[in-house]
Image (spheres, coloured by chain):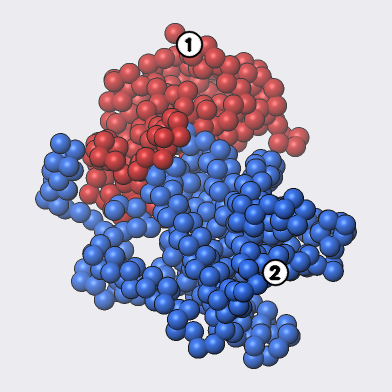
Chain colours: A blue, B red
């Protein structure tokens, strides 16, 4: 692999084994969890992982930081709930249809909001989630307002809570895996190279002929779709929706923190961030009750990340490991013999 | 044949008319130079022509097509490549990926193809070899020297297969040996049929390299012609030296 993000200096076999072991541990979690509460924490973390990977389609690939992604998860949640309660649609079909509708709605939203960059885009994203919060609170006839909206459970009443947790844990992991595979495919495609060029220097990318607006819009819609899927799945798991939690800037901020913490440029960065932040949030809530202390702790965490690991945990760990490798320098030159060898191999591969 | 032309091109920033009804034409197959004192509007003119800035009025015509106000990527695809005054590369991408970012893609299927397919890599490496930095292909662009970044920028522009290349101060901040290399490259590429429009302050380079010179002052052309003619034009001397 030749890209900066995927400079494969660790042999592919080792990475594959590591991935299989990691996945095995994740899948074994429900069996290892000592009680239903820990299992439910696992579901929350898995839902955060799905949301953070969905966020990273825009944040990681284009560098556009959205603090308002709760807009799409909230819409996905309410869409799913309303399709079930009002139209009598099957819960799983409702979840997918709601996500598709949110994806469609993301087209005009993206056309309007992706015209601005940097801090302006952040503000637009916040504005969207605040508008939706007000609408959801005021439109009580449909959303239930501040009284909340009950979402029927998708599994029968004979399925007990712990088993529900277990099933939803696997569903969130599956959704995360699908999103990760798509992110990986985009990352290594020409589209991905164009997107990363946008992240680095949008004007320069345009000058090279990259249709930046269309590229941004594509990943924006994909991101909204997966975020809505995760939102819909959360609604089915949690069983009730309240605007103040569904359309919360805090959720968007968590997603940004998770992705920054793990590393927005790496495939698994948002997942690592989701595990750390998700666990920290639940730990603080559990230890100190429903105070705002967990927010203070997360604020400190964000400050530390920005100050000491601006690229996130994964790139930081990789760079620390690189220091112990022989011949690790900042400039990686290839000599003529190496180049000739690689070209020969490429030509043979072409034949 | 005139193939890149502006007519009454105007762009104001507040009360300052950076480009003021500029009517300019550039000839195909030549090395055209655009010179003028600092603040005379050369870069703004470049930005209006390449779509980076939408002009307030006037038109830009390329190969007989009105491209005024078109998005920069459309103008780039029409065959007009450019570099920037302050050299711009993608700092966190490798040298090779910087060049691959210029690959022309059409259609969804083409865009979803792997970014590192052998044909593209072979072409990118050819271009890196041509500008003399193929040994740095795995380095991140932020790790290489400014002069090497200038060469990398040129290789990226060439990957997009432009007919016309607009270079904004290619010799700015570059050592004399590298200026010589850039000049040689420009001559070679021009001999292969590419047209150049170059904004440059290095008069020695402009006079030795260009076939046609346009002089800007206060946002509009005040003289144009062969380098030797322009050099002795009293309006040019006045603009540069105030005499």
| Residue extending furthest toward the bottom | A287
Secondary structure category for the residue under label 1:
strand
Numbered circle sitting on residue B30: none
Task: From the top left corner, tell me how far across and down residue A110 is, in percent.
Answer: 65, 44
Q: Chain of mark 1?
A: B
The correct choice, above or below, for B117 with respect to A249 in the image is above
Left or right of A107? Residue B81 is left
| Residue extending furthest toward the front | A158
Left or right of A117? Residue B137 is left
Q: Which residue is mark 2?
A: A239
Q: Nearer the viewer, mark 1 or mark 2?
A: 2
- Mark 1 and 2 residues: CB-CB less than 8 Å, in contact? no
Q: Residue at x 12, y 48 (%)?
A: A341
Task: From the top left corner, tell me how far across and down residue B227 is, in percent.
Answer: 42, 19
Which corner quadrant of the image does residue A244 belong to? bottom right
Task: From the top left corner, tell me how far across and down residue B208 is, in percent.
Answer: 34, 25
Secondary structure category for the residue under label 2:
loop
Q: Residue at x 49, y 41 (%)?
A: A204
Residue closer to the observer: B49 or A279 = A279
Q: Residue at x 73, y 68 (%)?
A: A240
Q: Residue at x 66, y 85 (%)?
A: A285
Quarter of the figure that contains the C terminus of chain B:
top right
Residue closer to the observer: B174 or A317 = A317
Tell me if mark 2 has few (under 14), some (14-19) or many (20+) residues whose alpha carbon lies within 10 angstroms of its own: some
Residue closer to the observer: B72 or A229 = A229
Task: From the top left corner, tell me how far across and down residue A226 is, in percent.
Answer: 57, 55
Q: Would residue A108 be visible to someone looking at this image?
A: yes
The correct choice, above or below, for A149 with respect to B125 in the image is below
Q: Chain of mark 2?
A: A
Residue closer to the observer: B47 or B157 = B157
Q: Which residue is mark 1?
A: B2
């Amino acid at each position: 692999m030749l890209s900066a993000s995927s400079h494969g200096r660790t042999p592919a076999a080792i990475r594959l084994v590591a991935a299989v072991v990691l996945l095995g541990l994740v899948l074994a979690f429900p069996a290892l969890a000592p009680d239903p509460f820990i299992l439910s924490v696992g579901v929350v973390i898995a839902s955060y992982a799905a949301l953070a990977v969905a966020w990273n389609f825009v944040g990681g690939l284009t560098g556009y930081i959205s603090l308002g992604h709760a807009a799409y998860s909230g819409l996905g949640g309410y869409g799913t709930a309303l399709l079930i309660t009002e139209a009598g649609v099957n819960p799983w079909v409702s979840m997918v249809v709601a996500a598709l509708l949110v994806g469609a709605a993301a087209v005009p939203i993206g056309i309007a909001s992706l015209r601005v960059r940097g801090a302006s885009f952040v503000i637009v994203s916040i504005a969207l989630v605040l508008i939706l919060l007000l609408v959801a609170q005021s439109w009580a006839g449909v959303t239930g307002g501040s009284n909340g909206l009950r979402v029927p459970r998708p599994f029968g009443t004979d399925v007990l809570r712990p088993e529900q947790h277990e099933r939803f844990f696997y569903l969130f992991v599956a959704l995360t895996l699908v999103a990760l595979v798509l992110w990986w495919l985009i990352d290594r495609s020409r589209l991905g190279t164009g997107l990363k060029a946008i992240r680095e220097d949008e004007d320069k990318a345009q000058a090279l002929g990259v249709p930046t607006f269309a590229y941004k819009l594509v990943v924006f819609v994909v991101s909204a779709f997966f975020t809505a899927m995760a939102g819909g799945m959360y609604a089915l798991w949690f069983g009730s929706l309240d605007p103040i939690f569904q359309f919360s800037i805090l959720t968007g901020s968590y997603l940004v923190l998770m992705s920054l913490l793990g590393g927005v440029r790496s495939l698994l960065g948002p997942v690592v961030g989701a595990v750390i932040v998700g666990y920290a949030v639940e730990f603080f809530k559990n230890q100190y009750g429903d105070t705002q202390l967990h927010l203070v702790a997360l604020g400190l965490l964000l400050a530390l990340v920005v100050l000491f690991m601006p690229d996130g945990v994964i790139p930081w760990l990789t760079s620390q490991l690189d220091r112990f490798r022989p011949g690790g320098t900042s400039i990686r030159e290839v000599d003529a013999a190496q180049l000739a060898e690689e070209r020969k191999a490429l030509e043979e591969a072409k034949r | 044949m005139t193939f890149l032309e502006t007519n009454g091109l105007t762009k104001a920033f507040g009360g300052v008319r950076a480009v003021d009804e500029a009517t300019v034409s550039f000839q195909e197959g030549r090395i055209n130079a655009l010179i003028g004192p600092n603040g005379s509007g050369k870069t703004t003119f470049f930005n209006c022509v390449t779509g980076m800035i939408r002009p307030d009025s006037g038109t830009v015509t390329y190969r007989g097509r009105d491209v005024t106000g078109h998005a920069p990527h459309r103008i780039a695809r029409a065959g007009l490549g450019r570099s920037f005054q302050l050299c711009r590369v993608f700092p966190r991408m490798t040298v090779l990926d910087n060049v691959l970012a210029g690959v022309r893609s059409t259609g969804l299927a083409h865009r979803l193809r792997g970014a590192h397919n052998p044909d593209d890599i072979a072409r990118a490496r050819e271009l890196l070899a041509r500008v003399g930095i193929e040994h740095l292909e795995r380095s991140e662009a932020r790790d290489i020297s400014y002069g090497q970044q200038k060469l990398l920028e040129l290789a990226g522009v060439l990957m997009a297969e432009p007919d016309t290349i607009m270079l904004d101060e290619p010799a700015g901040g570059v050592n004399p040996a590298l200026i010589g290399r850039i000049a040689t490259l420009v001559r070679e590429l021009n001999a292969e049929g590419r047209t150049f429009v170059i904004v440059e302050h290095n008069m020695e380079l402009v006079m030795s390299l260009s076939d046609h010179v346009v002089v800007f002052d206060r946002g509009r052309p005040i003289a144009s012609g062969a380098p030797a003619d322009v050099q002795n034009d009293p309006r040019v001397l006045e603009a540069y030296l105030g005499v």
